[in-house]
Structures are given as C-alpha cells and as structure tokens.
Image (cartoon, coloured by chain):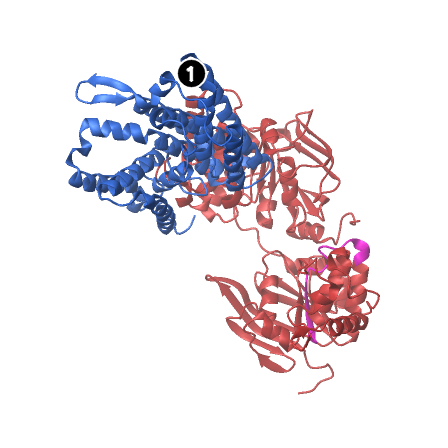
Chain colours: A blue, B red
C-alpha cells in the first residue's frame, strides 16, 4: 500500500505563503502604476519603517491566534504604553532607559493577566482581552485626567523617527526597520523552536497536546505575553514616530488580526506562519497606501479591514472543506 | 389465521439495513406479542441500536417489512412511530431538569385552552398516567431536577406512554440505576405487561434479561441468530449464541513465564467517578488485556492510569515507588504512555506534519538524553522502524491512513522510552495489514521489557494478544482470566453471569 502524494493544490493550502505573495505582488504593481517611484529605495524604506509597528503587532498576534485565541487588547496597550512613557519621561532625556524597562515589565504583566485569566479561569480570550482593552483605556484616562501629560524625550523618540542616514544605494534605513528585522528574526526562530511547534499543536488540537504532556495553559499564556511584548515595542516606535495621543493605538488590534488572517493564519488556531502574518500586515499597509493614492477616503479603512477578515476566513474554509 | 397465541403486536420480517455499504442488519425477523417482554441481546456492534431505531422510525429499513398492530407500516420519522403507538426510552435521560414532571410528560403536545397551555389539564392528565403505572405518589408538579435517577426514569417511561403507546422500547434502561432502584423498574415493567403493552428490552445485563423477559432474541453481526424462550434457556447457552466466532487472524506468541520481569505498576483500591475498588498488578514483559462492555470502565481505567481522569482514591506505584498520577504530564514523567481510542480527537494534531506529531511529547516533556538534534534523529529512526508509509515527514498527518497515523502516535511515545504503555483500542479503524504490524509492535515492546495494558472491545484481539485478561463490569474488575480463555469466558464476565456479584 502506497500513500498518494498530497494534491498539488496543497502548496496553496491555508497557511502557505503563495496566496499572500500573489496579493502583495498585485497590489505593488497597481501601486507602481500610479506612483512609479514607490519602489525606489527612499520611498520603500520609509514605507517599511512606517509599517513596522503593525507588522510587529501582526507577528505578536500570530502567536496568540495560532494557539487558538485572540488578543483584542494590543491597540489599547499601545496607547497605554505611549501615555505612560510620556508621563514618566516628561522630557527628561536620562529617564529613557529605566522607563523602557518599566514599559516592558508592564507589557509582560498585561500578557500574563490575559493568558492566565483565559487559561486558568477559562474565560474566552476575546472576552478577557476585550475586558483588558476597556480596563486599559479607562485606567489611562483616569490616570492622566483626560489628557496625556508630560512628553517623550528626543532620545526616546529616536528609535521611532530616526534612521541610519547617507547609506549607499538605500539612502536611509529607519531604525524602526532595523528593530522590525531583528524582531522578525527572533519571531522566526521562536516559531521553529520546540515552543513554537508545540504552540501550533495546542491551537490545532488542545486535547492531543494535553495528553502528550503539554502544559496548554503555559503555552497559551506565553503567546499572550509575546503579543503584549510586541505591542510594547510597537508603542515605542509609534510614540517616536507620531508622538503622544490617546489615539496612538486605536484600531491596531483589528489591523493586526486582519493582517494575520490575510496572511493565512487560521482563526481558531493550529495553522499559519509568522512570516505570513507579517506579509499580511505589509499587504494591508500597501492596500491603504494604494487607497490613499487613488483618493479613497481613509474613513473606509475599518470597512476594508472588516471585509478582508470575512473574505479571508471564507476563502480559508473554502480551501479546507474539512478540518 | 388465528391460533392459540395472540397475534403479534410487532412483526419484523427480513429487516436489512446498510450504512455506507456496511451491512448492519441482515434479514432480521422478530415478533413481540402484546404484554410480552421481549429481550434483545448481543455484543457491542451486533446491531441492537440500529434495530431499535428502525422500529422507532429513526432509520428506514433497506429491506423487509415492519408490521405493527396487524398492519404493515412505514415510519418515515420517530413522530409517525410515536403516533402509531411506539414509545421509546433511551439509555440517557432526555428530560428537562428545570421543568416539572407534567411539563416534561406533555412536552410538545401540551393541552391547550383558548390558545394557552392548560396547566390544570396537564397536571391531571399526568397524574392519571402516573397512577396507571402505580406511581401515583409522584407529584406531577415537582421539578424533574429534584427527582432521583430512578424516579426520572419513571417520568421518561410515562412520557413514552403518554400517547397511548402499545409497544415500549427500552434501551439499556438500568444503565443509570443503582441496584435497589432496579427492583422499582422491574415492578413498573410488570405493570406495563398487565396493561397488555409489549416491551422490547435491550440490555447487556443477562440477569435482568432472565428476570424480566419471556423471550430473548440474540443478535450477532447484524443477524438474529436465535430466538429463545427464556424458561428453556440458560445463561451459558445465551453467551454461546452471542459469540462463537472463530479465531482467524494471526497473533504474535504470548510471553513465556520466564520472560516476565518485575512488577512495574500496582494499583490498590483505585477509584474515581467511574471506577471502584481497582486492584491491579502489571509486570514487565506482559500484555494485560482489559475487556468489558462499552461503559464498563475499561477506558476509564486506562485514563485513570494516565492521569487524564485520575484516580481520586487508592494508591499507585511504578517500579515499587509510590506515584501520584494527577495529570498526563505527571504520568509521562513516571514513564507511562497512552494511546487513546479516539485517534482523531486525542491522538493527532491533524494539521501538523508527521514529524511535528511524532515530536510532540518529546518537545513537551524533556526526559533527558541529548538535545533537539538527538531527539529528532531518534524520532526519524522510530518512524522508519514502525515502517511508516507517508509522502515524507513534512506531510500533514491528516492525509495518512488510520494505520499510519497510529504508527506516528506510537513513534511519539516510543521516543520517550516509556516503561508502561496503555493502549485503548490500538487497532480501531485500522486496515488488516497495519493491524498485525501494530500487534507485532505491541508484543515486541513487551518483549523489550515494557509493561503493556491493552483495552480492546474486539474479542479475538483481546484473546490473541493478552497474556492475562481482566474483565471490567460496572466500574469494577469483574474477574481475571489466564491466557487461553475463550470468548464465552470474557463475555460471561462482562455481562455478569459469573464472577463476583456487583453491589
């Protein structure tokens, strides 16, 4: 008895990178048709730097989604971190480092709470993280009496707004892009590690994982922590790039989820790649840039994101009639 | 056409039914007379449930005729059967615990007055029904959730009778009952008989069958192999009809006594919600078979030993040292592996690759010996050793056949070099070739010094593979059989004609 090879179609399977690469290529072609110098190094570098926060969040969201959960709290966490940083730094250049450490600790704490409430108290993660979203929004308003206080130091903002200048060929490379590449490399290593593979198993079949000795609660909690750490990193970049506001992270959670789904990460878990999620984020940003160039109102962004989520999920279940 | 006997209430002639090309019922004849309790017995999978579903209109027969109350009938759905006068009481209770007895009995056909439910009519109607079966003391306005299981069953039966049923099907009615509650059920069934209601009584428990029925039909592999008058038959004879199959396939040789090593695992007084008083010893080099009917606790035993549904009482030792098996992880650390009967739900991660599936336990529980590279190399060796057939180690496991999926699950455990292996239905849903490969593997593991516990509902497999067999009944070990036992021995212990009495 010989098992037949899987059908050729499977290179296009959900979780494979082919679909998202095709979509990205099509969008880039449309974009260069309208704006021929979009792919020139300076423009491309600045586009990638600008997109870094969303790409980071998509990578973080990948870990949560692939484990079978959702993290709706990342947008409000970005806002909270930016507001906290501004108030604690208050223009003091020397406060940058200690505050960065504090932000990281706060991010990890938020991830731990998300993860432990979801796994140990068995609250569905979209409820847990929606609760966290509201708690963070409310707490930040309360803590700053309705308007952000203080301000970020120039040193703190450098990571988000400055670049290596005057390089040959590429011109300038934003620090944000370097941060992104480092984080992407780390994420890639992580997905190939024992933890990363086990996490996919947890999302794919938690019963099997449990019966194979996996501590499911621990793996999922780690995923939430990773997502929160990604949000913290994104907050530093966004604070640097666009400054302090209560809107700093608004809507980013849906951006990250849309990106991950677009990149072939299956809602419900067990399927997808972190590269796909990050490419999904780039594709989404390319689409918004395209809409911008074609004069489509920015107000349509949420509508477009919603439509993409629905279409991508429908397409994935169409490709995979039985799971 | 009239004889001395009353004409049958229900007559099945040549009933045949197939699902997806598998013949589940084959030319079944069966008659129930008014006021008769007719028992239907058979092994798991003999076709009892399907036959009951044909009578109650859930399934339509492919062949044969159903005659009810003298006229040929075709029931297209359970509703039509119910309206014709066939009531059914399922194994599991189907009542709404938050509603009253009367509301449950009249569910879906509440008496109306001016468009509203007539509560008073409902209560008096239910009270009448209860009184007619001698249960008049049960107040019809009690919430069902407050009743005991036995009383709930009375409500189920009354509900089934509410539409003037003339035939009542009872599918394992005592499964949920304690011993003293069974007597109450007996009384109720006898009263139904007096009213001329025919009863089709499906049960695993031969004691009940002999206590209650006037005739017994034995189903085996979808055929009615015998219909016997209860007074003229014995439990032994019944069991012989139920099994009596030939041991056809090949099994590896059992262990010689000198091959058995030290005691690997002991359980003393193990119990939990599904198990009571489990005493067990498992030696290195031996395959201990666990038999019993579905729901007898055989799977619960394996799950308890693996910490998936742990023992709440009792003591367990592994290699002489006391252990607490509170989670699968703890059991794995104690050197125990478990292959679930539900491969798709609990054995594999369908969307992951062969390699990821095989590495799963090793990644989660690091038991020393080398790093990642060594672990992967070992798993690759094992996948080759179990003769896996796949397009490659990166192929998703869901595209593999059941047998090859099972080999991957085995490789996953073997990578941890477990000293105790628990198999629950290791060859369920696996084709014949892969089956004997897995049998050989199980025996080889035992020869290499592992202690193996194997749950199986396939009697030939159980008898062919085991060095020793324990048979479970009602959450207890009903008895132990040496190698060379017969199918009759196992079935007799499983259904309770011999061995320690329960309770």
> What residue is drawn where x is 29% and y is 27%?
A49
Report if residue B168 lies within the magenta region: yes
In the rendering, at what x and y percent does residue B27 appear? Answer: 55, 70
Range covered by the magenta-colored residues: B163-181
- Extreme residue toward the right, this view: B137
Question: Does residue B229 appear in this view?
Answer: no
**Chain for mark 1?**
A
Along the line of sight, the residue nearer the viewer: A50 or A228 = A50
Residue A58 relative to residue B477: left or right: left
Residue at 34% over, 42% down: A262
Residue B339: within the magenta? Answer: no
Q: Which residue is mark 1?
A: A96
Q: Position of residue B277 (x, y in %)?
A: 75, 40
Q: Quadrant of residue B195?
A: bottom right
Q: Is residue A18 left or right of residue B268?
A: left
Quarter of the view holding residue B253:
top right
Q: Position of residue B427 (x, y in %)?
A: 52, 45
Helix, strand or loop for disc 1: helix
**Residue found at x 26% / y 43%:** A291
**Residue projecting furthest to the top:** A94
Q: Residues within 10 Å of mark 1 (few under 14, many from 20)?
A: many
* Residue plotted at (24% across, 44% down): A295
């Amino acid at each position: 008895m010989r098992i037949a090879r899987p059908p050729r179609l499977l290179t296009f399977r959900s979780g494979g990178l082919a679909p998202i690469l095709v979509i990205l290529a099509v969008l880039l072609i449309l974009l260069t048709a309208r704006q021929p110098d979009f792919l020139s190094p300076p423009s491309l570098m600045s586009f990638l730097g600008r997109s870094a926060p969303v790409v980071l969040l998509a990578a973080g969201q990948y870990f949560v989604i692939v484990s079978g959960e959702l993290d709706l709290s990342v947008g409000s966490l970005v806002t909270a971190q930016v507001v906290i940083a501004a108030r604690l730094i208050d223009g003091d250049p020397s406060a940058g480092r200690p505050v960065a450490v504090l932000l990281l600790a706060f991010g990890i704490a938020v991830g731990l709470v998300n993860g432990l409430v979801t796994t140990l108290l068995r609250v569905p993660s979209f409820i847990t993280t929606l609760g966290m979203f509201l708690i963070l929004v409310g707490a930040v308003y309360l803590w700053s009496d309705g308007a952000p206080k203080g301000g970020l130091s120039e040193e703190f903002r450098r990571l988000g707004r400055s670049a290596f200048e005057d390089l040959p060929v590429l011109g300038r490379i934003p620090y944000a892009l370097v941060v992104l590449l480092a984080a992407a490399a780390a994420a890639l290593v992580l997905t190939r590690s024992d933890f990363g593979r086990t996490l996919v198993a947890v999302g794919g079949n938690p019963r099997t994982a449990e019966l194979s000795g996996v501590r499911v609660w621990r793996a999922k909690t780690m995923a939430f922590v990773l997502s929160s750490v990604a949000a913290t990193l994104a907050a530093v970049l966004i604070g640097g790039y666009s400054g302090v506001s209560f809107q700093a992270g608004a809507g980013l959670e849906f951006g990250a989820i849309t990106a991950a789904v677009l990149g072939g990460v299956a809602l419900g878990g067990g399927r997808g790649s972190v590269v796909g999620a990050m490419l999904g984020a780039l594709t989404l940003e390319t689409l918004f840039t395209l809409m911008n160039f074609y004069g489509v109102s920015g107000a349509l962004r949420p509508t477009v994101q919603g439509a993409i989520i629905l279409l991508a999920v429908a397409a994935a279940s169409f490709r995979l009639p039985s799971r | 056409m009239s004889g001395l006997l009353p004409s049958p209430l229900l007559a099945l002639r040549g009933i045949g039914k197939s699902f997806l090309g598998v013949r589940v019922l084959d030319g079944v004849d069966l008659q129930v007379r008014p006021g008769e309790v007719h028992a239907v017995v058979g092994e798991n999978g003999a076709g009892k449930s399907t036959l009951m579903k044909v009578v109650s209109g859930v399934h339509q027969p492919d062949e044969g005729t159903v005659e009810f109350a003298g006229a040929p009938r075709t029931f297209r759905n359970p509703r039509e059967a119910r309206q014709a006068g066939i009531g059914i009481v399922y194994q599991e209770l189907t009542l709404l615990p938050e509603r009253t007895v009367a509301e449950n009995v009249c569910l879906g056909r509440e008496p109306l007055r001016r468009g509203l439910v007539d509560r008073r009519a409902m209560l008096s109607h239910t009270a009448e029904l209860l009184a007619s079966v001698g249960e008049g003391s049960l107040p019809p306005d009690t919430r069902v959730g407050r009743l005991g299981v036995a009383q709930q069953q009375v409500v189920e039966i009354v509900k089934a009778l509410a539409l003037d049923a003339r035939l009542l099907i009872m599918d394992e009615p005592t499964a949920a009952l304690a011993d003293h509650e069974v007597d109450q059920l007996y009384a109720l069934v006898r009263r139904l008989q007096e009213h001329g209601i025919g009863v089709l009584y499906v049960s695993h428990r031969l004691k009940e069958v002999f206590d209650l029925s006037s005739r017994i039909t034995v189903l085996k592999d979808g055929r009615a192999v015998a219909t016997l008058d209860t007074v003229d038959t014995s439990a032994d004879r019944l069991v012989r009809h139920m099994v009596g199959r030939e041991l056809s396939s090949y099994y590896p040789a059992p262990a010689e006594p000198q091959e058995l090593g030290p005691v690997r695992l002991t359980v003393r007084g193990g119990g939990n919600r599904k198990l009571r008083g489990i005493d067990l010893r498992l030696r290195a080099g031996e395959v201990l078979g666990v038999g019993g009917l579905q729901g007898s606790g055989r799977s619960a035993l394996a799950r308890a030993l693996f910490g998936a549904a742990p023992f709440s009482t009792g003591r367990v030792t592994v290699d002489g040292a006391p252990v607490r098996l509170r989670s699968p992880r703890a059991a794995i650390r104690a050197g125990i592996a478990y292959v679930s009967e539900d491969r798709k739900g609990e054995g594999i991660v369908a969307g992951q690759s062969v390699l990821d599936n095989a590495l799963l336990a090793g990644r989660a529980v690091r038991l020393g010996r080398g790093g990642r590279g060594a672990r992967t190399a070992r798993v690759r060796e094992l996948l080759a050793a179990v003769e896996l057939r796949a397009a490659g180690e990166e192929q998703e496991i869901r595209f593999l056949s059941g047998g090859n999926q099972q080999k991957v699950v085995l490789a996953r455990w073997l990578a941890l070099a477990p000293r105790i292996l628990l198999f629950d239905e290791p060859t369920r849903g696996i084709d014949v070739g892969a089956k004997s490969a897995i049998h050989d593997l199980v025996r080889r593991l035992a020869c290499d010094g592992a202690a193996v516990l194997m749950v199986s509902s396939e009697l030939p497999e159980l008898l062919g593979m085991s060095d020793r067999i324990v048979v479970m009944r009602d959450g207890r070990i009903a008895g132990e059989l040496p190698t060379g036992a017969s199918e009759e021995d196992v079935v007799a212990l499983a259904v309770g004609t011999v061995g320690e009495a329960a309770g």
